[in-house]
Image (cartoon, rainbow, N blue to C red):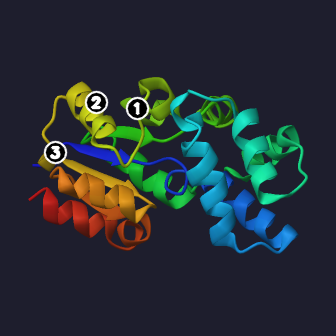
Amino acid sequence: MIKVLMLDFGGVYFRDGYHVFMTKLAEKYSIPREVVVKVVLDDFVYGTGFVVGKASEKEALTGAFEKLGVSEDWRECHKRILNWYTPREGLIRFVKSLRGRFKICLLSDQTDYIMELEEKYRFFKDFDLLVISTQVGTAKPGVEIFNIALKLLKVKPEEVVFVDDNPVNVSAAEKIGVHAFIVSDFERNGFEVFKKLTR
């Protein structure tokens, strides 16, 4: 029996400002997007520990810019990235329709951006539990962050539906027994998924 809907933040509940930023950076400097993503995300956002609170955004972004050979002010980039995070209203309406019948959990690799976005949009109230990588010191696709959420929610993996925009994270959740979906698939079939899994 499904008891929990667990959601990623950037790319699921909100549009992902970092991904917009990386696309625009790649276009501006004529660098292949996959190179920008690897350097910014893999090497610096995750590689420096920024996403789990072990490095500052200044360290992550300035390091990435240096490696890419581009000239950008990390503070200005922060402002632009923040503005590119916007609510995905269709999914938000669907999630709100489930309140009271299911627990709703946000499980996200996020930094201080999420606190700034909460000040602007006041969406924390939509969730019964928030598990944020910088607050718990571990990130997806590692199993530990899922286990933290399961323990706090007091549920078994098979009682959870998880939605993410990253196939690697979806696969990680599936390996521990969670019903996991890529967001595009979930948006097309969300109601049907819940009907099937909650029978």
Q: Can residue 87 be seen from the camera position used here? A: no
Q: Are marks 2 and 1 in contact (CB under 8 Å)?
A: yes
The numbered mark, 3 or 1, whose residue comes first in the sequence reads 1
Residue shown at the point (45%, 36%) measured from the top left: 126
- Of pointers 3 and 2, the one earlier in the residue sequence: 2
Q: Is residue 54 above or below residue 99?
A: above
Foreground of the two, 173 or 84? 173
Callout 3 amino acid: Pro
Q: Secondary structure at mark 1?
A: strand
Tag 3: Cα neighbours inside 10 Å, few (<14), some, or many (≥20)? many
Across and down, in percent, residue 10 comes to 55, 51
Say which of 112 and 58 sits in front.
Answer: 58
Q: Nearer the viewer, residue 28 or 130?
A: 28
At numbered mark 2, what does the secondary structure look like: helix, strand or loop? helix
Q: Residue at x 83, y 41 (%)?
A: 74
What residue is pinned by disc 2? 148
Which residue is under mark 1? Answer: 131
Which residue sits at x=37%, y=72%?
185
Q: Is residue 47 left or right of residue 131?
A: right
Q: Spatial distance from mark 3 to mark 1, Cα to Cα?
A: 16 Å
Q: The C terminus lies in which quarter of the figure?
A: bottom left
On residue 61, the disc is none
Measured in 3D between alpha carbons, the distance from the residue under mark 2 to the one under mark 1, in whole angstroms, is 8 Å
Counting from the top left corner in percent of width and height, residue 108 is at 46, 42
User: For residue 157, which numbered disc appears in the image?
Assistant: 3
Contact (CB < 8 A) between labels 3 and 1?
A: no
